[in-house]
Amino acid sequence: RYAYVNGRFHRHSEAAIHIEDRGFQFADAVYEVWSVRNGQLLDADGHFQRLQRSLGELRIPSPRTRAALEQIIAELLRRNRVRNGLVYLQVSRGQARRDHAFPRTATTPTIVLTCKRLDFAAADARAEAGIAVITVPDQRWARCDIKTVNLLPNVLAKQAAQEAGATEAWLVDADGHVTEGSSTNAWIVTKAGKLVTRPADNHILHGITRARIFQCSQLLDLEIEERPFTPAEACDAREAFLTSATSFVTPVVSIDHHTIANGRPGSLATALRQAYLDQS
Ligand code: PDD
């Protein structure tokens, strides 16, 4: 296996960054995740645009042009023989002697790219069964719209979900509303058949898959209400589902051990998953 670090491909086991990298010391870094299907990046434009935005918000200079990154990614996938899986890209502010403020002399951003195979058949099976989620308090900061590697609250939430026998944790803010999942956006379907998801404000990641569902919903003639919802409303909903680059659309069949509707994946979530995959 190979990884790309700062201009070169290295054997995965030997790839390394400096101990005084600001990504390591301060989580002063952003990242992106693309799914790869049949050798192609899914939603390439959206993820490249969000990468630019995340870098801009943190004033980290863009380390490569999009065209250069695309070439590196193609080579990475070729070397690793990955046709179905994901690509992970991380860019940190670079290395400098530890000091919280930005280094006074400009650093060279650290760039790391890895990829791995994913078994999309297993993901399909998970979607056909539907998954369980639990809710936990949202303990993150007020700029969740920036895709930073500052993910400790997300890590703890996902661990809590796994320990509870669930697949994902939905994060609940101080007002009692679901913000999003630890690594996914959260959706419900009302009894009237409307899709509900939280507005893309500073409390959630503006999911690229979430944006694609807005397009798919038009094709299926479905209405979307962008507003916060509570776990109680979700438990009582007709359907619930989540979205992300690697899980596409995945139906949720229980929340905090409470069964949603008849405990089977909902028809709209299933139709949206199909529409998303058909359009990709
Ligand atoms: N997670 N919300 C959070 C907190 C996320 O980390 C992600 C993505 C999403 C969904 O965004 P998108 O549709 O653009 O993937 C929502 C990636 C997959 C990860 O951390 O691995």
Image: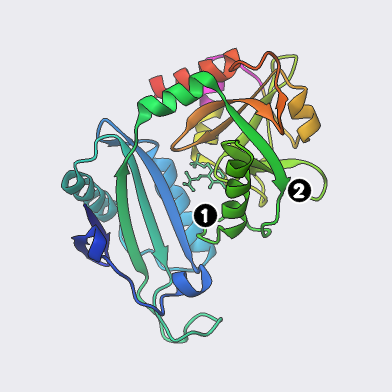
* Res 206 quadrant in image: top right
The image position of residue 11, as x and y in percent, is: 20, 60
Q: Considering depth in this image, is 39 or 43 the residue closer to the camera?
A: 39
Q: Which residue is mark 2?
A: 173
Residue located 54% across and 33% down the image: 243
Q: Earlier in the sequence, mark 2 or mark 1?
A: 1
**Where's the C terminus, which quadrant?**
top left
Q: Quadrant of residue 166?
A: top right
**85 left or right of 53?**
left
Residue under label 1, please give it.
Answer: 147
Q: Residue 72, percent across and down?
A: 23, 53
Q: Residues within 10 Å of mark 1 (few under 14, many from 20)?
A: many
Question: Which residue occupies the extreme left position in the image?
Answer: 79
Amino acid found under the numbered disc labelled 2: Asp
Q: Which residues are magenta?
A: 215-223
Q: Nearer the viewer, residue 165 or 263?
A: 165
Q: Indicate how the structure is coloured in the image.
A: rainbow
Tell me the residue at 70%/22% (across/down). Answer: 259
Q: Is residue 153 above or below residue 18?
A: above
**Location of residue 159 in the rendering, given as x and y in whole percent from the top left corner:** 58, 49
Q: Which residue appears at 49% of the width and 55% of the height?
A: 53
The outermost residue toward the right is: 175
Amino acid under disc 1: Lys
Residue 186 is drawn in which quadrant?
top right
